[in-house]
Image: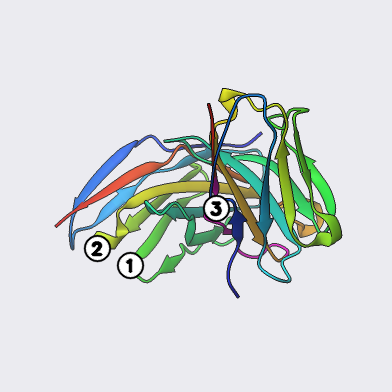
Amino acid sequence: DTGVSQDPRHKITKRGQNVTFRCDPISEHNRLYWYRQTLGQGPEFLTYFQNEAQLEKSRLLSDRFSAERPKGSFSTLEIQRTEQGDSAMYLCASSFAENTIYFGEGSWLTVV
Amino acid sequence: AQTVTQSQPEMSVQEAETVTLSCTYDTSESDYYLFWYKQPPSRQMILVIRQEAYKQQNATENRFSVNFQKAAKSFSLKISDSQLGDAAMYFCAYRSVGAGGTSYGKLTFGQGTILTVHP
C-alpha cells in the first residue's frame, strides 16, 4: 500500500493554459475526493466520487474545472484557461466507504 | 451548511508540556463525525484522532485526546507530553452522516491552528 499519490507535485503555468492533475488513490478505496487549499487556510471541498460516479460538486468548481474517475480507479482534475486565482494546492484523498480518509501530498499550482 | 471555527491561529508549547487546541462547529445534524488532522511542513494531511458524535466517551490516541461537548458544539484537542515532531498545522474537521448511515463523505475544515513546539 503506497498511499494516495498525486502527480505532478508542482506545476507552474501561464495564465490561460490548461493543466491536468492526476490522483491515484489507495487500491480498493471506492471513494475519492478533491480539495483545494490556499496558503494558511483549511482545505475546501471541490468534488467527490464513489467508484466512477461523481456524486457531489462544490460551487467552487466552476465550468473551467472538470474531474473524472474513469473505471473507478485513478482520477484527473483538469483546469482550463487557468487564472491567477487558481493558484493553490490541490489535494486528493481517498477512503473505503465511511472509513478514514487518507490524503495525498498535494499538487501545487502556480499560475503566472 | 456546517461550519467549523478554529479561533486560535497560532499556539505554542514547551516540549513535554500540554497544549489544548480549540474548535467549535455549527450543525443542525444529530449524528456526525469530528476529526483532528495534522499537516506538517511536508504538507501531507495525517489523521490524528476521530470522534463519533453518538459516542459520549471522548476519543484518545496515545498522547492525543479530545474534549467533545456535543451540546456546546465544542471539540478541543489536548496534546500531552508535547514533542518537537508535533509541530504542524492542525485542522479540525466535520463530516456528515447521511440518511441510512451512509456518509456523504465531504469533510468541512476549520481555518487551522499553527502549533509551535519549543525545545
Up-down relation of residue B79 to residue A56 (above or below): below
- The residues tagged by marks 3 and 2 sit, at their Cα atoms, a distance apart of 24 Å
Q: Secondary structure at mark 2?
A: loop
Up-down relation of residue B9 to residue B86 (above or below): above
Looking at the picture, which amino acid does disc 3 mark?
Leu
Q: Quadrant of the N terminus of chain B?
A: top right
> Which residue, given by chain and number where applicable, does mark 1 sit on?
B63
Looking at the picture, which amino acid does disc 1 mark?
Arg
> Which residue, given by chain and number where applicable, does mark 2 sit on?
B83
- The residues tagged by marks 1 and 3 sit, at their Cα atoms, a distance apart of 18 Å
- The residues tagged by marks 2 and 1 sit, at their Cα atoms, a distance apart of 10 Å
Q: Secondary structure at mark 1?
A: loop
Depth check: A68 or B111 in front? A68
The answer to whether tags 1 and 3 share a subunit is: yes
The answer to whether tags 2 and 1 share a subunit is: yes
- Name the mark nearer the viewer: 3 or 2: 2
Q: Secondary structure at mark 3?
A: strand
Whether label 3 touches label 2, CB < 8 Å: no
**Is residue A99 part of the magenta span, yes or no?**
yes
Up-down relation of residue A44 to residue A62 (above or below): below
Q: Residues within 10 Å of mark 1 (few under 14, many from 20)?
A: few
Residue drawn at 58 percent across, 51 percent down = A8
**Is residue B33 part of the magenta span, yes or no?**
no
- Name the mark nearer the viewer: 2 or 1: 2
Residue drawn at 52 percent across, 44 percent down = B71
Q: Quadrant of residue B103?
A: bottom right
Q: Earlier in the sequence, mark 3 or mark 2?
A: 3
> Which residue, given by chain and number where applicable, does mark 3 sit on?
B34
Residue drawn at 20 percent across, 51 percent down = B13
Magenta range is: A97-107
